[in-house]
Amino acid sequence: MKIVLSGPDGTGKSTILEELLKQIKDHSFAHTSWRRFGFVLARLFNLLGRLLGWSYYEDTPGGRLGYHNYSGVAGRIYIFSIWIDWNLFIKPRWKLSDSLKNGKFILADRYLIDIVADSALSSGNLRFALRLFDAAIKDHVASWECVVLSCNPDLVRRRRPDIRFDKNYERKVKIYRCIARIYRLHMIDTADSRPDQIAKKILQRCG
């Protein structure tokens, strides 16, 4: 069984992943991984973006935050480069890795949904990102138990001071909600329950 937790920063993915491990360790060996990146072409594009002023960092009291402002044709090229990375590098790598593991549970903290959300955020073009990744997302959802975590942004900012300074956080939340709604992904509000209760709920849903 494969479970992936997706969602904006600060919604509790890592904490809930730890709770999942605690709750399944007595009856199944689980493998965990963090799968958000692995870019090759997109990384090169980001280097070009920094030279052209499309990609930049800001030093804030909460730490260093990076922004990509790709729009128009540049945004489409960026999304396309991520799509190529997914098909040539990211998916094959993890498919091979998973095939070599004998555990009954494979748990991932972020994966394809997060990659698509990031590409949409950086380009401002969610429609093109979903059009390009539609088949990949449907295949992903068919083979993984995809859970999108959400939380009230004000509560997240109290939990994570660095997020107070993220100018794009509200947009991130909207993008994740939109993707979850379109693909009918299971959404859990982490403000309503303790991490152990949420982990139990996820395991019950997975059967």
Image: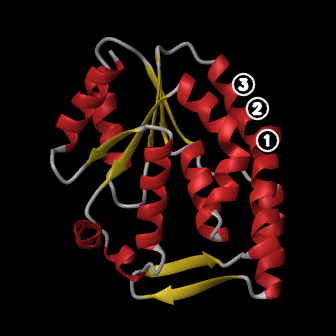
Label 2: state its secondary structure: helix
Give me the C-alpha separation between circle 1 and circle 3: 11 Å
What residue is shown with label 2?
A: 92
Categorize mark 1 by other alpha carbons within 10 Å: few (<14), some (14-19), many (20+).
some
Q: Point out residue 156 in the picture as x, y percentages from the top left corner.
A: 28, 66
Give me the C-alpha separation between circle 2 and circle 3: 6 Å
| Contact (Cβ within 8 Å) of mark 2 with mark 1 | yes
183 left or right of 88 in image? left
Q: Note whether 66 is above or below 8 in the view shown.
A: below
Residue 151 got which mark? none
Q: Note whether 103 is above or below 187 in the view shown.
A: above
Q: Point out residue 57 in the picture as x, y percentages from the top left corner.
A: 61, 83
78 left or right of 97 in image? right
Going by the numbered disc 3, the residue's amino acid type is: Leu
What residue is shown with label 3?
A: 96
20 left or right of 59 in image? left
* Closer-to-camera residue (36/147): 147
* Closer-to-camera residue (51/78): 78
* Closer-to-camera residue (127/11): 127
What residue is shown with label 1?
A: 89
Label 3: state its secondary structure: helix
